[in-house]
Amino acid sequence: MKILERSWIVILLWLASLVTALAVASAQKDIFFTLTYLFGGLLIASFLWAWLNLQWTRATRQTRARRSQVGKYAEERFILENTGPLPKLWLEVRDHSELPGHRVSRVVNSLPAHHQRSWAVKTTCYRRGRFMLGPVTLYSGDPFGLFLLKREVQLASHIVVYPPTFALPGFSPRIGQVSGGDALRRRTHYVTTNVASVRDYEPGDSFNRIHWPSTARNNRLIVKEFELDPMADIWLFLDLENRVHVGRAQDRTPDLTLPPLLRVLRDEASHIELDPSTEEYAIAITASLAKHFLDRSRSVGMVTYTRKSQREFAQTDRGERQLTRLLEMLAVARAEGSIPLAQVLSAETVHFTRDTITIVVTSSTDTDWVVAMRHLVTRGVRSIAVFLDPSSFLPETSAGHHERAAQRVVADLIASRIPTYVVHNGDALEAALSEANVQAA
C-alpha cells in the first residue's frame, strides 16, 4: 500500500472516531474519544518523526576532478552527516546527475547523532560533453510509513568529459619542416635549436638553458633565449555541418545489475568503442590529431562551426594548455552547423601562407570543398584530407548513393594530389590514420 493511501486511511479513521464520539451517547464517548486521541497522536508523532529526520542533516559531495575523458573515470565521495541530537532512522539520497551511469543515490539506515556516513562512486565516462552533477534530494519517513517528506539540497556542479584520443604512431605525412625556412622571429619558452639572445638567469629557468661561456665572462648566471623552429603551423578544420553527418549514438549505460566492483573490472578490461556516427568519429579523430602534433611540440590551431553557425576558433599554440583548450572545445561540439565546408575553407584560409598545413576532417560528399582544397594546394599550402566514408555508417539499403558519392570525392582528392585518409565505421583509428592507408597520386 502506498504511503499516501496509508496516511489518508489513518486520517479518515481519526475523522470517523471524532464524528462518532460527538454523535453517540455519553456512555460510549470515552471509547471513541480514546480512538480519536490515538489516531491523532499517531499522525502528529509520525509527521514529526519524518520531519525531524530531515533536520540537522548536512550533505557534502567531493568531486575528485572536474575534468575527465571518455574511457576514464569520474570519481566522487558523498558524505551524509547527522549534526543533531537525535538519531535518524533512515535517509534516502537521490542524486539527479546527468552523467550517464553515475549512481550516487543511496539509502542510509540508522545514522546516530553526530555521526556521518560516506561512500565513494567511481563511474566510467561513456560519453563526451558537459554534465551536471546534482542536485540532490533527501527523503525520509516515519516507522509506520504514513509520511514521506523530502528536502532539496543544491549540491550541483559540472564535469566536462573530453572526447577520447588514440595514439597515432603511424601518422607521419611528409609535412615536416618548411623547405628553406628561416627561424621564426618569435621568442619562445621552449628549448629549440635556434638561439636568439642571452639574458640574466631568473628563478624557474632550467639549467640546460645556461650559457656557460657568458656566465664565465660575466661572473653571473646567463641563460639562452630561443626562437621557434621553422616548423609549419598546423590548422585542423573539423566539418560539423549537420546535413553531412550520419549515424547515431548508442546507449552505453553500464549494466547496473552487476556488483560495483565487477562493473569497474569489466570497464577496465574493455577498450574504447566509438559510437557508429560520423560526428563521434570526426571529433575523436580531430582530438587524436591535435594530441599527436602537440606531443611533438608542433603549433596547432583549430576551426569549426557548430550550432547556430557559431564559430569555434583556437589560435595556433603549443603545449599542454593548448591541448586542454582544444579538448574543451571538442567536448561540447555538436554537428549542428549550417555553413558548408567549402565556405569555411574559403573564408578561413585567405591569409594562409606556405608556412601553413591544413588538415580537413569531414564526411561531406560534396565536391565543392575538394575544389577549395585544390586552390590551397595551388597557393602552396600543404593540405591533408581525412574523409569519413558516410556509406559505412548507414544500413546497406540506403548506402548505395552515399557510396558512389564518397568514391567520387576520394577520386577527386587523389587527382588533386591531396594525401587522403579514408576512415570507415568500425576502423581502428591507429590503423586507418597510418601511412599504409594513405591514398595519394
Image: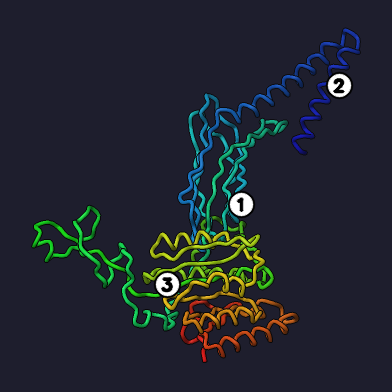
Image height of 148 relative to 360, above or below: above
Q: Label 3 crowding class (10 Å Cα cut-off): few <14, some 14-19, many 20+?
A: many
Q: Which of the numbered marks, if any, corresponds to residue 233? A: 3
Q: Position of residue 2 (x, y in %)?
A: 76, 38
Residue at the spot of label 2:
16
Element marked by disc 2? helix
Which image quarter: residue 50? top right
359 or 378, nearer to the observer: 378
Query: Which residue type carries mark 3?
Result: Asp
Above or below residue 73? Residue 392 is below
- Residue ranking furthest to the top: 26
The kind of residue tagged 2 is Ala
Q: What residue appears at the point 56 percent right and 66 percent down from the top-left corner?
A: 304
Q: Which SS class for mark 1?
A: loop
- Kind of residue at disc 1: Glu
Secondary structure under badge 3?
strand
- Camera-nearest residue between 304 and 106: 304
Mark 2, Cα crowd under 10 Å, few <14 / some 14-19 / many 20+, is some
Report if residue 257 is visible in the image: yes
Q: Are marks 3 and 1 in contact (CB under 8 Å)?
A: no
Judged left or right of residue 318, residue 81 is right
Whole-percent x and y of residue 213?
11, 66
The residue under label 1 is 98
Q: Nearer the viewer, mark 3 or mark 1?
A: 3
Q: Which mark is residue 160?
A: none
Q: Separation of disc 3 and disc 2 at Cα? A: 85 Å
Front-most of residues 297 and 267: 297
x then y, percent, for residue 202: 22, 54
Q: Is residue 365 above or below residue 127?
A: below
323 sits to left or right of 214: right
Question: Label 2, label 1: how many angstroms apart (C-alpha)?
Answer: 47 Å
C-alpha separation, residue under disc 3 versus residue under disc 1: 38 Å
